Amino acid sequence: MPMQDGFHVLDTLVSMGNRLPILFLTGFGSIPLSVRAMKAGAAEFLTKPVSADELLMAVDNALLKAASSFHHNQEMAEQVQRYQLLTPRERTILELAIGGLLNKQIASELSISEITAKVHKRRVMEKMQTRTLADLVRVSERLGISSARSR
C-alpha cells in the first residue's frame, strides 16, 4: 500500500460512510491542521507526545459523542418513519395545526366538520407519538416540516 497521509485516510474513511469516531494523532500539529482535521470529520486532534490518560480521555469523549449522535440519528429515522405513515390528509392537518390553526379553522379550511378535524388531528398526534401540540411542533421542526401558513 502506498504511503498515505492522515488526511487522505480520513477523507477515504468519511467518503466510505464511516460512522465510528476518528482520532487524529500527529507528531506535527498546528492550529490550521487541527481545524482542517476537525472540518474533515475527525472527532479529536492530538499532537504527540500524548499521555495514556489524555489518549483514553479523547477515546472516551469520541465514543460518547458517537453514541449521542447514533441515538439522535436513530430517533430522527423513527420520526421520519412515523411521518411517512401519515395519509396525505393527515399531513395537511399536521401542517395546518403546527401553523396555529384551531380545529374549527382547520375544518373551515378543508371544508370538513370540526369533529372530523379533531379526529384527524388526534390520529396525527397518535401516529407521530406526541402528546401536545408543542411536541408536534418540535418534531415537525426537526423534520423540516413547515406549516401551511408559512408557505
Image: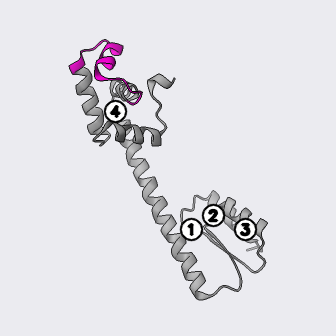
How many residues crowd around disc 1 within 10 Å: few (fewer than 14), some, or many (20 or more)?
some
Mark carried by residue 101:
none
Q: Which residue is mark 2?
A: 13
Three-letter amino acid code at disc 3? Ser
Q: Which residue is mark 4?
A: 86
In 3D space, how far apart are the residues under numbered discs 2 and 3 (Cα atoms)? 17 Å
Q: Is residue 22 magenta?
A: no
**The residue tagged with tag 4: helix, strand or loop?**
loop
The image position of residue 26, as x and y in percent, is 73, 77
53 is higher (above) or lower (below) than 76 = below
Three-letter amino acid code at disc 2? Leu
In 3D space, how far apart are the residues under numbered discs 3 and 1 (Cα atoms)? 15 Å
In the rendered structure, the answer to whether residue 5 lies left or right of residue 83 reads right
125 is higher (above) or lower (below) than 70 = above
Foreground pick, 28 / 81: 28
User: What residue is drawn where x is 60% and y is 69%?
Assistant: 22
3 is higher (above) or lower (below) than 108 = below
**The residue tagged with tag 3: helix, strand or loop?**
helix
**Region of the chain picked out in magenta, as a range:** 98-115
Foreground pick, 14 / 35: 35
Three-letter amino acid code at disc 1? Pro
In the rendered structure, the answer to whether residue 144 lies left or right of residue 48 reads left
How many residues crowd around disc 4 within 10 Å: few (fewer than 14), some, or many (20 or more)?
some
In 3D space, how far apart are the residues under numbered discs 2 and 1 (Cα atoms)? 10 Å
Q: Earlier in the sequence, mark 3 or mark 4?
A: 3
Q: Earlier in the sequence, mark 2 or mark 1?
A: 2
Quarter where residue 31 is shown: bottom right
Foreground pick, 18 / 31: 31
Q: Which residue is mark 3?
A: 34
User: What residue is drawn where x is 26% and y is 32%?
Assistant: 123
Q: Which residue is mark 1?
A: 21
Three-letter amino acid code at disc 4? Leu
